[in-house]
Amino acid sequence: MLRVLCLLRPWRPLWARGCASDGAAGGPEIQVRALAGSNQGITEILMNRPRARNALGNVFVSELLEALAQLREDRQVRVLLFRSAVKGVFCAGADLKEREQMSEAEVGVFVQRLRGLMNDIAAFPAPTIAAMDGFALGGGLELALACDLRVAASSAILGLIETTRGLLPGAGGTQRLPRCLGVALAKELIFTGRRLSGTQAHALGLVNHSVAQNEEGDAAYHRARALAQEILPQAPIAVRLGKVAIDRGMEVDIASGMVIEGICYAQTEFHCCYPDWSAMARSQLTATSTFWVQAILLPQPPEYLGLQERTTMPS
């Protein structure tokens, strides 16, 4: 059984230019499905733009942004899984045909929206998994890089190929790939625009798992769902805070990272020992912890009052 969430406000400004949604049977390009039964807690984002090979067009991006905004507030989402409804394709990258219709200013705005989309995926509070059963090129691989975990079919083709088009990765690829693989290897892959098979990507550490493709063309999806099922039994607050500790800790020196870990650990202890505390009390603790994390990431010079320092805390 599936619980389907409807998108409330489809984005349509470019339809007058002939950029209408081409989802199956004129349906949405992004579909959200909350699984039930033994899979309850897993929510899938199904990308469904077959005629454009799931290219990142304006409608597609807007529907995906709206879906993420809705799901971010849904505490029933324990794992978010990105998959494709188009056989042989995960996401073919930016919609270059649509981009040809844009002015230079519109292109700049659209690229900023793409960066915002990838940042929203990266900042999603629950673990995210990309199931790549086919081509994941350019922006398609950048979308997968924004996810926490990646699974690819051995026959899938992955690559940041923008330099072969006279461009460079503009939706986070130049930042997330080196954080994933290291600077030298990331430079090699971006400079050459090299395409990798799922097997090669796994050998390099670009994906967590690579599996042989099946006749249905959804082997990576099934492996990704099995991975999500391993996460489901774990304490959801601990998993979410583990994600915060890792993501924020990777942005700072190890000493500051240890402080962030301590803050997150304290929150897990609080929720474990005092599960019946009011939502207001939990919110206050979260606000306090968030303050200290921000203080580490964006340090402000302290105000000295004689021999005593004063730090402003949230009210």
Image (tube, rainbow, N blue to C red):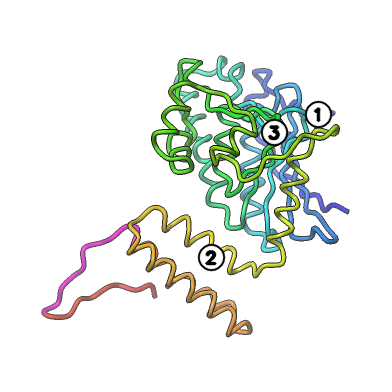
Front: mark 1 or 3: 3
Give the residue type that dot 3 points to: Ser
> What residue does disc 1 label?
26
x%, y% of residue 284?
48, 75
Residue 96 percent coordinates (x, y): 58, 18
Q: Foreground mark, 3 or 2? A: 3
Residue identified by numbered label 3: 154
Mark 3 or 2, nearer chain start: 3
Q: Which residue is drawn at 35% across and 60% down?
A: 254
Q: Where's the C terminus, which quadrant?
A: bottom left
Q: Quadrant of the image for the N terminus?
A: bottom right
Residues packed near mark 1 inside 10 Å, few (<14), some (14 to 19) or many (20 plus) = few
Residue 65: % across, % down: 61, 42
Residue matched to label 2: 241
Location of residue 7 with respect to 93 vertically, above or below: below
Residue type at mark 2?
Leu
* Most foreground residue, 190 or 111: 190
- What segment carries the magenta color? 296-306
User: Is residue 250 placed above or below 157 in the rendered structure?
Assistant: below
Residue 43 x, y percent position in the rendering: 73, 52
Q: Give the farthest residue toward the front.
A: 203
- How far is mark 1 from mark 2, CA to CA? 39 Å
Q: Residue at x 39, y 52 (%)?
A: 251
Mark 1: secondary structure = helix
